[in-house]
Image (cartoon, grey):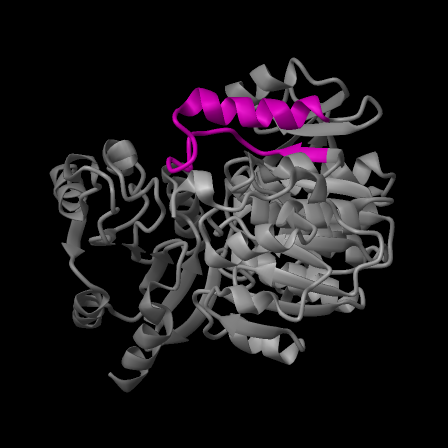
């Protein structure tokens, strides 16, 4: 069927009805959509969903939450007729269920719209945006607010350790949102964060990423400029001024801007950072004056910067230094961010989401400082749309300097992208060797595991960097080390 003859969604039906009872989610097994299903369920709605890939752990979570999920997209999934459909951004306009949605003229919204219209209205929305650090910073903010007794709602792209969940309905006045710059839906190509009604926003950084939806860096900058433009005059933008692009964009902010970063010229900065195995200690500086001594279990300069952003929010909402220090020290982390998955045969296995070159660089530097004197082995799976292109090929060769050995998995090729534009793990390994580093590339996870088992020794630290499951390499490695 040609696009011209397909049923089209009626834009007048793009809203959250005042009193729906049954809500259906298309693409329900995505991390954000699964959390949305949980929020809507807790808010008292009957929830159903569909997805092309229904499997654990999300399938088990949804089943336990009482969400009926259909495996595969079909017109009949919209029977009985729901009162509202939430359309995930994995859904294309030619999806059979989307076509049936248009034919039936059912009200529909995107996932960001649903969050904004249903859960953020009437709340003080705290939005964490930027190329790096969103999940950690928003998790830290939500957990510290909860520890301070403010019971915030939140929607975050990772599992927050204190809640063992990536969402919470919350009864307090604050709602914390991880502000993703990815596109909203096939009928709304704007970034998700434009729906999040920020009263206080954190902007951590602005770099090129998401090559599948942004043509160039100027397009990325424009998306963040749009976020800044919707800040209310009475709002506050807390921005990392170490990043010159952030400084440039914030010049047009219609609201108060609070700066933070390494430079002591900014409103919030730090000094005397002391890393150790177990925690990081630093002095908090406000306008270059020591405000107190703080410590965190999160290693690395980038995590101190994430902490500064959250402490600045606490100051904006009137919480004191004693509460800040107590809650930062109590934070237990977030899944898949420098998460120690286990120790076997003296080898520490760490799971981290890092994939952008800047994140790889900062993460490995943090781990090298956190485990002084120990051999650090980085195992990298390029899996994102950007990392599987040549965009970062040369830059990757510069960001593994903190690792004593680098192991790279050859990624699956991107369909529809010319071979000349594909990232090469073999070329990266050769470049690293040329720089004097120990490095190797492998075609699959099985070969990587065999290599690791043959070369790892007691005392080694293995940092596994991937934004995906990486064939469960973490647990497989730990099990093999235990058996060895």
- Front-most of 271 and 217? 217
Q: Residue furthest bottom?
A: 483
Figure check: 88 above or below 435: below
Point 69% across, 64% down: residue: 82
- Front-most of 185 and 406? 185
Where in the figure is residue 84, as x and y percent of width and height?
70, 57
Point 45% across, 29% down: residue: 207
Where in the figure is residue 381, as x and y percent of width and height?
30, 54
Point 38% across, 38% down: residue: 212
Q: Quadrant of the C terminus?
A: bottom left
Where in the figure is residue 9, as x and y percent of width and height?
59, 44
Where in the figure is residue 436, as x and y percent of width and height?
15, 41
Highlighted magenta segment, given as a residue range: 201-230
Residue 226 colored in magenta in the image: yes
| Left or right: where 470 falls relative to 225 | left
Figure check: 220 above or below 460: above
């Amino acid at each position: 069927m040609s696009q011209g003859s397909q049923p089209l969604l009626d834009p007048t039906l793009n809203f959250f009805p005042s009193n729906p009872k049954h809500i259906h989610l298309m693409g329900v097994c995505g991390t954000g959509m699964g959390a949305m299903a949980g929020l809507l369920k807790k808010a008292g709605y009957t929830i159903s969903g569909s997805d092309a890939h229904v499997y654990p752990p999300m399938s088990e979570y949804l089943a336990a939450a009482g969400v009926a999920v259909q495996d595969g997209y079909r017109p009949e999934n919209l029977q009985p007729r729901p009162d509202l459909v939430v359309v995930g951004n994995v859904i294309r306009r030619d999806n059979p269920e989307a076509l049936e949605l248009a034919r039936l003229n059912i009200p529909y919204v995107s996932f960001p719209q649903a969050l904004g219209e249903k859960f953020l209205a009437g709340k003080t929305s705290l939005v964490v945006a930027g190329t790096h650090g969103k999940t950690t910073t928003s998790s830290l903010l939500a957990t510290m607010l909860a520890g301070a007794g403010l019971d915030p709602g939140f929607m975050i792209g990772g599992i927050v350790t204190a809640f063992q969940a990536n969402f919470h309905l919350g009864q307090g006045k604050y709602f914390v949102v991880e502000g993703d710059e990815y596109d909203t839906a096939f009928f709304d190509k704007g970034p998700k964060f434009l729906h999040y009604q920020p009263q206080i926003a954190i902007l951590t950084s602005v770099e090129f990423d998401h090559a599948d939806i942004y043509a160039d860096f100027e397009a990325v900058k424009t998306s963040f400029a749009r976020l800044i433009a919707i800040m209310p005059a009475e709002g506050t933008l807390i921005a990392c001024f170490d990043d010159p692009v952030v400084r440039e964009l914030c010049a047009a902010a219609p609201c108060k801007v609070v700066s933070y970063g390494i430079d002591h010229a900014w409103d919030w900065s730090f000094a005397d950072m002391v890393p150790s195995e177990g925690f990081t200690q630093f002095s908090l500086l406000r306008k270059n004056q020591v405000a107190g001594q703080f410590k965190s279990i999160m290693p690395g300069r980038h995590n101190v910067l994430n902490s500064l952003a959250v402490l600045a929010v606490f100051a904006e909402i009137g919480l004191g230094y004693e509460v800040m220090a107590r809650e930062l020290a109590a934070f237990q982390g977030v899944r898949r961010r420098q998460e120690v998955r286990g120790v076997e045969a003296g080898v520490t296995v760490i799971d981290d989401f890092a994939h952008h070159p800047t994140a790889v660089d900062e993460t490995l530097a943090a781990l090298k400082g956190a485990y002084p004197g120990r051999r650090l082995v980085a195992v990298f799976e390029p899996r994102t749309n950007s990392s599987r292109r040549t965009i970062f090929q040369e830059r990757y060769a510069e960001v593994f300097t903190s690792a004593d050995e680098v192991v790279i998995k050859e990624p699956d090729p991107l369909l529809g992208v010319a071979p000349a534009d594909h990232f090469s793990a073999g070329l990266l390994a050769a470049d690293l060797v040329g720089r004097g580093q120990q490095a190797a590339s492998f075609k699959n996870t099985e070969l990587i595991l065999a290599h690791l088992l043959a070369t790892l020794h007691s005392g080694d630290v293995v940092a596994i960097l991937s934004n995906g499951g990486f064939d469960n390499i973490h647990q497989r490695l730990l099990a093999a080390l235990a058996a060895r």
